[in-house]
Image (cartoon, rainbow, N blue to C red):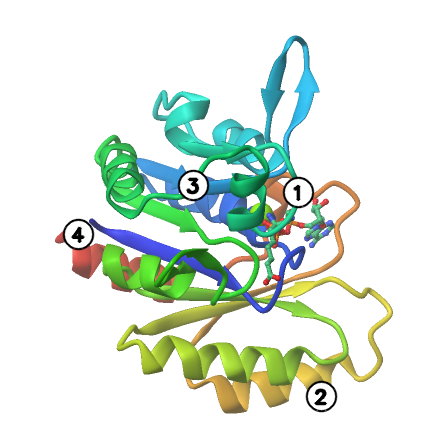
């Protein structure tokens, strides 16, 4: 599978927003992009069906004709850790069928953008977590850093965990969670100096964080270099 695994310093730091922006940007660059949210916890009943917001946003960002189920193959009602959400419904998360579903969805495009769940090490089932999922998929990792006090430590812990799994951290995106964050520039400098991976962009707090608006703040030079080489484009 060709693509990137999108992780974050935490839940609610902008992984979906940035993945939608990356989908837009790579699509503009001429690639057929398959955004995938393999596990989605938290559904609402809208127009007669249960839907997940992440899946809807990623589904809306792609233009290769994926169905919502292909974007989000495994969805749970409760907005909590996925293994807990699954247990609440008497279900379990099974590794082999989920990997098969991700591969099938990725095959619909030429570049897969796989969004994780929460931070990098969220348990999925006995002996398998989201870091293992990234390893199973063999994808290089992009880290979304939610800019707020504490993010330097979270970013460095995540980078260490990514590398400890033998995965490559190919880039990181600074996403403005706290628009009033003091010493923003100094924080960005510290992140840049210590993450040892290229920054793909700094996304400000946007009034309307549409994929196009997010993409305007992303610089895909590093990403395209990497993906064109990986894809032989
Ligand atoms: N740069 C931004 N400007 C404005 N709003 C943003 C920005 N980034 C994220 N948001 C908003 O913050 C919320 C959390 O973002 P998002 O859903 O992308 O986080 P996440 O890391 O994917 O969360 P989860 O762990 O639930 O998957 C969303 O409502 C999103 O629209
Ligand atoms: C529901 C929420 N928005 C995410 N999709 C799930 C976050 C799981 C985090 C688990 C944890 O690390 O404690
Ligand atoms: Mg998300």
Give the residue number, with chain letter if any, for mark 3: 92
Give the residue number, with chain letter if any, for mark 2: 186
Give the residue number, with chain letter if any, for mark 1: 79
Q: Can residue 219 be seen in this view?
A: no
- Alpha-carbon span between mark 4 and mark 2: 36 Å
Looking at the image, is mark 1 or mark 4 earlier in the sequence? Answer: 1
Residue 187 versus residue 149: which sits nearer the camera?
Answer: 149
Query: How far from the left and from the top, in percent, is residue 52?
Result: 59, 31
Specify the label residue 5 is tagged with.
none
Residue 24 versus residue 13: which sits nearer the camera?
Answer: 13
Q: SS class of the residue under badge 3?
A: loop
- Alpha-carbon span between mark 2 and mark 1: 34 Å
Q: In which quarter of the image is residue 181?
A: bottom right
Around disc 3, counting alpha carbons within 10 Å, would you say few (fewer than 14), some (14 to 19), or many (20 or more)?
some
Looking at the image, is mark 4 or mark 3 earlier in the sequence? Answer: 3
Specify the label residue 231 is tagged with.
4
Between disc 1 and disc 4, the foreground one is 1
Looking at the image, is mark 2 or mark 3 earlier in the sequence? Answer: 3
Between disc 2 and disc 3, the foreground one is 3
* CB atoms of marks 4 and 2 within 8 Å: no
């Amino acid at each position: 599978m060709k693509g990137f695994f999108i992780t974050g310093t935490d839940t609610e730091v902008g992984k979906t927003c940035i993945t939608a922006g990356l989908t837009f940007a790579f699509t503009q660059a001429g690639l057929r992009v398959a955004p995938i949210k393999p596990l989605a916890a938290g559904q609402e009943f809208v127009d007669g069906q249960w839907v997940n917001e992440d899946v809807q946003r990623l589904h809306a960002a792609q233009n290769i004709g994926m169905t919502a189920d292909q974007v989000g193959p495994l969805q749970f009602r409760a907005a909590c850790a996925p293994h807990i959400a699954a247990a609440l419904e008497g279900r379990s998360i099974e590794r082999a069928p989920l990997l098969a579903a991700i591969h099938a969805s990725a095959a619909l495009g030429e570049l897969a953008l796989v969004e994780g769940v929460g931070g990098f090490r969220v348990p999925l089932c006995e002996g398998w977590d989201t870091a293992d999922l990234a390893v199973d998929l063999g994808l290089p990792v992009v880290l979304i850093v939610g800019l707020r006090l504490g993010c330097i430590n979270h970013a460095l812990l995540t980078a260490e965990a990514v590398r400890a799994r033998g995965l490559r951290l190919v880039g990181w995106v600074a996403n403005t969670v706290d628009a009033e964050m003091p010493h923003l520039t100094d924080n960005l400098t510290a992140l840049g100096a210590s993450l040892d991976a290229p920054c793909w962009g700094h996304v400000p707090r946007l009034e309307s964080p549409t994929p196009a608006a997010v993409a305007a703040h992303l610089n895909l030079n590093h990403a395209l270099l990497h993906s064109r080489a990986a894809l032989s484009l």
